[in-house]
Amino acid sequence: MKKIKKYIQFIKENTMFQYNNMIDYTLLEESATDQDIIELCEKANMFGVKSVCVLPKHVSLATKQLENSKVLVCTVISFPEGTNTIKQKISETNQVISNGADEVDMVLNYHELQGKDHLYEVDYLVEEVSTLVDICHSSKNKNGESIILKVIVESGVLTESETKIATDICLEAEADFIKTSTGKLSVGAELNKIKVMYDTIKNVNSDMRIKASGGVRTTEQINSMLGMVDRFGMGYAAVDKLNNLVVDTNSFY
């Protein structure tokens, strides 16, 4: 315990600590083991992040590890392509909620917005988002609050006009967040696309929020987005580095 307390004090003294409660601390690798998830949750508690973001198959374990923690459990749906049918997305969402997920990040079928006449696609995409919004908002997280739905639009492969359409879809469907990226493509969060999202949201006086993810690794990047972004999706390795985490292998075993 003394070793863990030492880490907590060390973390609080670094410049990253002030941002940790805005971070979804992410490990979305298929190769991640149960031990990796257990260690992720232990570090999440030390850092005081907003959530751990893990694959659906790891939700039950993360929920168990964080049962008595303020840290939430977030997971992804139709990840990373977003091409699952509405029926499949409903099934996935119900399953992860049943397993204890506190937040759900769904991948929009963003391919339907790329270089097309969007009239039909918009109606379909609003339906898939609003359907999952209803499921999430009718369920409660471990704090007794409605489960949050974030919508990943993969803005790095969309134009600014397509990003605006994606934002309008999320607004019409009453999503809690629009999220830039899966982090699986070469282009992630971009300031110009975030500004499009922000301006579109403000123009209708909505309280929908923005999550920036994909390539966010430095405090400089975080600072450049503050004021527009409420949540950051960051890989665990980047968060560990920014928090100056030094692992003492003798402290846990």
Image: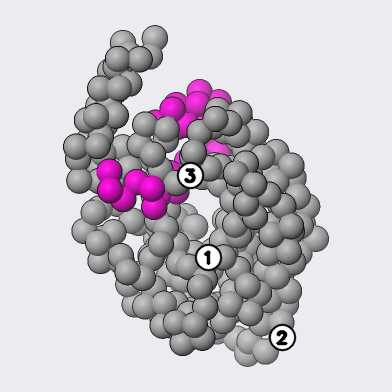
Q: In which quarter of the image is the N terminus?
A: top left
* Circle 1 Cα neighbour tier, 10 Å, few/some/many (<14 / 14–19 / ≥20): many
Residue at mark 2? 120
Residue 70 in picture, x, y percent from top left: 49, 38
Residue at far front of view: 144
Quick check: 83 above or below 3?
below
Q: Work out whether residue 215 can be spotted.
A: yes
* Circle 3 Cα neighbour tier, 10 Å, few/some/many (<14 / 14–19 / ≥20): many
Three-letter code, disc 1: Phe
Quick check: 129 above or below 159?
above
Relative to 149, 217 lies left or right: left
Q: Are marks 1 and 2 in contact (CB under 8 Å)?
A: no
Residue at 38 percent of width and 48 percent of height: 21
Residue at mark 3? 51
Upstream in sequence: badge 2 or badge 3: 3
Quick check: 123 above or below 225?
below
